[in-house]
Amino acid sequence: MSAFLGYLFTAGGVVAVFGVAALWALAARTRKLPRRVLLAVTIVYAVLSMHVFAQLASRPLVAGLHPFSSESADGQPRAIVVLGAGAMTVHGREQKLGMVTMTGAARVLETARIARTLPSIPVVSSGGPGPGFDMFPEAEGMRDALVNLGVAPSRIVLESRSFNTHDEAVEVAPMLRSMGADPFVLVTSDIHMRRALAAFRAQGVHPIAAPARDPLDSEPAWLSYVPTRQGLDFGSAIVHEYIGLVYYKLRGWL
């Protein structure tokens, strides 16, 4: 259900919904209702594609979160953990190239900032391969980006088996215990932080929240008030988080 609702907020989902609504309007004997539905769908997608409205919807998810600082940390962090946000793998004729997404890049940037603040602790890059054939693990793409930002490769530990937040908590928690690296700084997107914190705490470890900056914050302010592809992606992520919180609660993962 979560994946299906998330798909409705992708570019492909928008095309599919509009296609179904348009075919209904053409095939129906009485076109008044389908035309109204088509208009309603247009308005809903237009609103949800505006970053400003998505930000309003995200407020319950981000309430109480603040940028990480070593002075305000509850306990001395012994590691930094950054969670994957989806990766892209481009296949050429002879080689392939793994890249982080915009959201993943924001998490990597925040991780690099904290790594400079806390220079003597390890960094765990977490995330398995994306869906599809012969895909790069997210952990490797984030590792490469962190190295490009000045983090020493020797500091970075990979967790490349997980496929979702619950998996990441299950895989990373024993790694942290074996390293004696608890409490730790947990880096992820602000809207994802509430679910991530709860998932890791359920594994008996003690994360310290370090929300990454919203990558859309750097765009011109006027873009927040017009429908954009990035705004639609952000709206999709918010829907995914609300559904994910309910699903994780029902599964006993929080």
Image (cartoon, grey):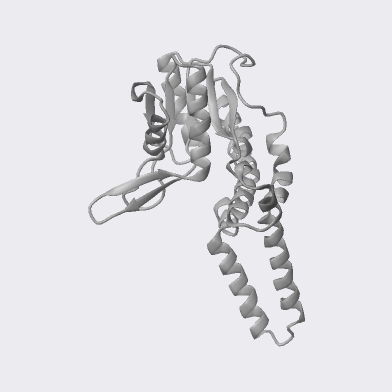
Task: Name the residue located 43 percent from the left edge and 30 percent from the top edge.
Answer: 149
User: Is residue 65 at least partly visible in the picture?
Assistant: yes
Q: Based on the displayed image, in which of its 4 quarters is residue 150 positioned?
A: top left
Q: Is residue 174 left or right of residue 9?
A: left
Q: Is residue 56 left or right of residue 76?
A: right
- Decide: is 213 above or below 226: above
Across and down, in percent, residue 4 comes to 56, 57
Q: Looking at this view, is 30 or 209 the one in front? A: 209
Q: Based on the displayed image, in which of its 4 quarters is residue 207 positioned?
A: top right
Name the residue furthest bottom. Answer: 29
- Decide: is 103 above or below 16: above
Across and down, in percent, residue 197 comes to 59, 29
Q: Based on the displayed image, in which of its 4 quarters is residue 98 positioned?
A: top left
Task: Name the residue located 58 percent from the left edge and 39 percent from the top edge.
Answer: 251
Task: Name the residue located 37 percent from the left edge and 53 percent from the top edge.
Answer: 132
Q: Is residue 29 left or right of residue 14?
A: right
- Decide: is 129 above or below 151: below
Across and down, in percent, residue 194 comes to 63, 33
